[in-house]
Image (spheres, coloured by chain):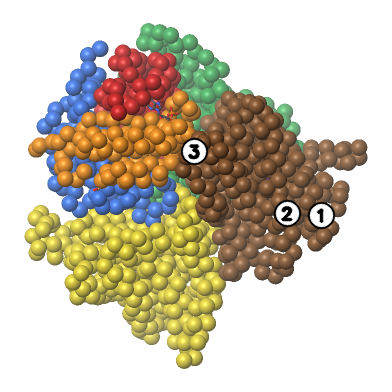
Chain colours: A orange, B blue, C red, D yellow, E brown, F green
Amino acid sequence: MTLHIAEKVVIVTEKIIAKGVCKIIDECGATGYTIIPAGGKGSRNIRSTTDRASVVDDFSNIQIEIIVKNTEMAEAIMDKVRARYFKNYSGITYLEDIKILRPEKF
Amino acid sequence: MTLHIAEKVVIVTEKIIAKGVCKIIDECGATGYTIIPAGGKGSRNIRSTTDRASVVDDFSNIQIEIIVKNTEMAEAIMDKVRARYFKNYSGITYLEDIKILRPEKF
Amino acid sequence: MTLHIAEKVVIVTEKIIAKGVCKIIDECGATGYTIIPAGGKGSRNIRSTTDRASVVDDFSNIQIEIIVKNTEMAEAIMDKVRARYFKNYSGITYLEDIKILRPEKF
Amino acid sequence: MDFLIDFLSRLVSQFQSPTLGFLIGGMLIAACGSRLTIPDAIYKFIVFMLLMKIGINGGMEIRDANLVEMLLPALFSMLTGIVIVLLGIFVFSLIPSVKREDGYATAGLFGAVSASTFAAAMVALDEESISFEAWVPALYPFMDIPALVLAIVLASIYMKKQNQDEQNDIDVWAIVKDSLQGSALSALLLGLALGLLTIPDRVFESFYEPLFRGFLSVLMLIMGMEAYARINELRRVAHWYAVYAFVGPIVHGLIAFGLGYIAHILVDFSPGGVVLLAVMAASSSDISGPPTLRSGIPSANPSAYIGASTSVGTPVAIAICIPLFIVLAQAVF
Amino acid sequence: MDFLIDFLSRLVSQFQSPTLGFLIGGMLIAACGSRLTIPDAIYKFIVFMLLMKIGINGGMEIRDANLVEMLLPALFSMLTGIVIVLLGIFVFSLIPSVKREDGYATAGLFGAVSASTFAAAMVALDEESISFEAWVPALYPFMDIPALVLAIVLASIYMKKQNQDEQNDIDVWAIVKDSLQGSALSALLLGLALGLLTIPDRVFESFYEPLFRGFLSVLMLIMGMEAYARINELRRVAHWYAVYAFVGPIVHGLIAFGLGYIAHILVDFSPGGVVLLAVMAASSSDISGPPTLRSGIPSANPSAYIGASTSVGTPVAIAICIPLFIVLAQAVF
Amino acid sequence: MDFLIDFLSRLVSQFQSPTLGFLIGGMLIAACGSRLTIPDAIYKFIVFMLLMKIGINGGMEIRDANLVEMLLPALFSMLTGIVIVLLGIFVFSLIPSVKREDGYATAGLFGAVSASTFAAAMVALDEESISFEAWVPALYPFMDIPALVLAIVLASIYMKKQNQDEQNDIDVWAIVKDSLQGSALSALLLGLALGLLTIPDRVFESFYEPLFRGFLSVLMLIMGMEAYARINELRRVAHWYAVYAFVGPIVHGLIAFGLGYIAHILVDFSPGGVVLLAVMAASSSDISGPPTLRSGIPSANPSAYIGASTSVGTPVAIAICIPLFIVLAQAVF
Ligand SMILES: Nc1ncnc2c1ncn2[C@@H]1O[C@H](COP(=O)(O)O)[C@@H](O)[C@H]1O
Ligand SMILES: Nc1ncnc2c1ncn2[C@@H]1O[C@H](COP(=O)(O)O)[C@@H](O)[C@H]1O
Ligand SMILES: Nc1ncnc2c1ncn2[C@@H]1O[C@H](COP(=O)(O)O)[C@@H](O)[C@H]1O
Ligand code: NA
Ligand code: NA
Ligand code: NA
């Protein structure tokens, strides 16, 4: 079995901008993404993961993971999301090296 | 503190085959796994993470993460899951290098 | 775009000790953390991710991810959490290398 | 002609029924891009409540029922389920653009029964004061299970022939068990048992019965929103699915209506029972059927059969078939 | 003096109203660190149920209503929403420690309408047997939407001037659409349509109507817990927000009461209607307003406006404004 | 002998009670591998509703009650909780295969009180038209808190002696506070306060009261499914837990019945009150107790005490103890 080097972009940000972030991801040409519910604490706020009735639930977090084959695309996604959203919305983004099975999928 | 090299297998696939995937993981000899709720978009479909009443909720995604000490076991899991399920079900799988604290746990 | 090396500490453990773990993370000086709902199987138990009414829901898992710039802080968090909780509570912890965009954020 | 005018006027009046109103309302707000959602937990609980109500009620009244009467209608239920599946498979086999497995799965889903459509029919009969035998809800599994089992078994045989699947032993009992363990049939059978074996009158009258209509209205809203949401999926597959999903419910219902009519003559099966039998046939499974078929015929494309059923089949069954069969019954009996 | 004694005695008696009791109870148990929570799914369903009940009821009774009567109150609703926003922006512009965008967003939120406060007012009127026109709930969007749109548009113009935002074309229709698509207005309008076009009397009487008070009580509990939980956020921003959130509802309500009084004289707007108009004005949006403002004025700090509204504005609107305007109406009319 | 026949015949008739039927039904469908689930959000809301109903009702009627009557029963409740814990710790200390901490935790859990079992007893008393003092639900914390506190304190002292724990200062007030902050006691006390201080009659009669039985039936179903699901966990630990969990509730209930009988003679404590006291003693905590013990005695194995309580203790308390104590009361008083 040969594994191929790829990158995973991770974005943790507010649920309310999920749609916009996904649009950027699509525009950059990624083949897909995975969205995971999240909460957390950062420089701006504490967001809960509990299922307590939050009257403004749209403000809780999501973690979006995007697997891309080349670093340029990864950096393009990170850069665009940061430039467009991270001044007004909470959010962080980082990169991980991964190994994929079927490079034609991504 | 000495850290030890290990591998993390990540599988993102449909909730409906969770049981079968976990059985494969057990059979390959892994000591455990972590399951995370997920949604996403891939080549086949868009799955929502929102909690909108999905009449067929069993079709939403999960992300399964398995920590294993040797690459053979990692590849065995990836290969079996791919062969058994990924023709008929949505799913991707990849590998990450990690460092663990207590090698005897895994 | 310059990316900077950093570390991600991952802790998978029982929801019931979430508060205590987060306190340790804060005390170690991390700038934030992300909490993800999780279930799983390990040496001690099987925890479900399904939303079946669990009469003792506080016992389900969470995955906490902490991004830190230096390995000492990462190891301090892992070590303290392990020492304080992992005798009596289910839990694992491991480390991943990542690349971050804005080192001043972390 | 008279019949047609009567039918059309009833159809118009049915459009004022809140059941249908909520269904259409759900489609409309989804079409308008509304962010209104009913949480999944509420949806699951509502389905549970409706099936428990139907089950408990049936169980309570079955106690004094003569279950021998049930034999022929039960047989006809099975027959209907089987005929719908065979007919569907045959029809789809004539359409070259439809993959064979997809045809099997779609036929299976339309042979199976929808709890929500069934509940809507019960409310509609109640509005018209048409009564039926207490054991009619118990016919549900007699149609649902054979349809699902037959579709999966035939698909497995077909796939074996194609050598696509090497080690696929067909385990009929496993499929039956899987159907019975689904949340819909479990709740219905549990309700039946509780109605039969315990004395749940007070809890039934203070809880399950009064909340029935209301929860059904919310469920209809959900079905409407879901129908709209899945139209896109349906668009991506052959248009024949939409045609089948439109015509199928009416044809399936008429077949069952005919069989019900025979049962009426032979064993005095009630007109209300005939209507419910026809609606069961017209309906397509929305809760337990899809996951069962997904595991049973994994190579079939779920967008095809779920899209067809949810976006077209269920609205047609509720909006057209329920009033159609009620008027038919009023004309015929 | 007499009026004051009457008001104070009524205020005391209102503190025995369960609505208020649940609100205060929620604050208290949150303050005591209780781990009691109401799941988010239940919260969302309760809001849906309350708005459907208000909508369906309105829709059912509007059928025979003379909608021309509605024109002036609808105009006054719009006027109130606009005046509240302009006033708020002006007031905040005088406070140097408040960032301009935050002022725009806060003013918008207080101009918009809270469904839960509105529902609490309906129950309070019912307790006092004060009636109102069937179409009063339909005034909701006439105040809500103009307030949100105006705040967002003015903020956008302001930010354009500051050159902070380069490519921001202001699309008023997009903001209106976004408001209408929010879950609160969607549910209200859906309910109105269903009440108007279908015959939902049975489902209304067996489900939406009897559960109204109970669900409202649970919602009040949630609002109370939330008010306490967000006090910390409010503390982190300028104290002027708390002052505005305390005084604002009373002033806004009095403005609307005055306009309502004029409508009473000109077109015989009912005293109950005047009270509801005043409460709408006094309330600040808790469900749809925050996300709409978050997208519309992204640079505004949500801790400021949501904290002000949830922690101070809503409790003041429910605990002080509702009894105040009821007593005012009883004194004036 | 007569008593036995009477008891057995009542036991049989209790098996027809829907409460028990739902419990057993839940076990059965779980045993059959059904995929039916009640969402967690619904479970949490049901528990909240039941405790609010019990609390509000108690609070409303306490207003005219002579609370001095409550003193002795409250004292006996505390005594019962303490005796159960001491007895349990002693019994487990005799069994070498049981780790000491596990014994402390299990004894604490069985000394604490189950809200759902208590609610089931209230419905059973209602069926038999046996009345009780309005303040009886307020006895709940008097038994629950001392039991949990005592178990945790004794376990901490024990572990200190073992030097396993170095810096563990025992903070009794922290444990009491943690108990009171739990969702069950919070809801009960909130309900009591609302019933006492506000006038919640209309919302109580339109919402909390009519939904009580129904929600209890769903809760029993959940308890049944949970009981079956946890049997595997119980199997993995010493069988003595199962024996204790079977015999314990009966013995604990009889102790409380005896004390209640004394209160009956001394201060005329009602027969219904005696039964409820006995059921509280027989029950083991299912909502707040487990997390409190988990934090308080972290080295104890939760599979042991939760498995014992959920899989055996609660079913025995509901299916055997409730009818047993009702018949006892009917024979004795
Ligand atoms: N050091 C960190 N490690 C892990 N997650 C973080 C960290 N800092 C921030 N986050 C996540 O990113 C979200 C937004 O962060 P911020 O923009 O700093 O408020 C937080 O809510 C966390 O979920
Ligand atoms: N490039 C990608 N990056 C991250 N997740 C992906 C990617 N492609 C697919 N996925 C995830 O894998 C699931 C199945 O993908 P597919 O089999 O391509 O439909 C999707 O629903 C996503 O959650
Ligand atoms: N080998 C593994 N791979 C991934 N996750 C694991 C593994 N072992 C344990 N876990 C996770 O860690 C939790 C606690 O593990 P344990 O302490 O072994 O019971 C489990 O419930 C899993 O979610
Ligand atoms: Na059918
Ligand atoms: Na307002
Ligand atoms: Na007890």
* Residue named by callout 3: E165
Q: x, y percentage for residue F291?
A: 45, 28
* Residue F94, above or below D215: above
* Residue named by callout 1: E262
State the residue in front, B10 or C17.
B10
Asked which secondary structure carries label 3, the reply is loop
The image quarter in which residue B10 lies: top left
N-terminal-most mark, 3 or 1: 3
Asked which secondary structure carries label 2, the reply is helix
For residue C90, say whether it is visible.
no
State the residue in front, F61 or D301.
D301
Q: x, y percentage for residue E118?
A: 67, 49
Residue in the image at 75% along x and 48% along y: E256
Given contact means CB atoms under 8 Å apart, are the residues at marks 2 and 1 in contact?
yes
Q: Amino acid at mark 2?
A: Phe
* Residue named by callout 2: E76
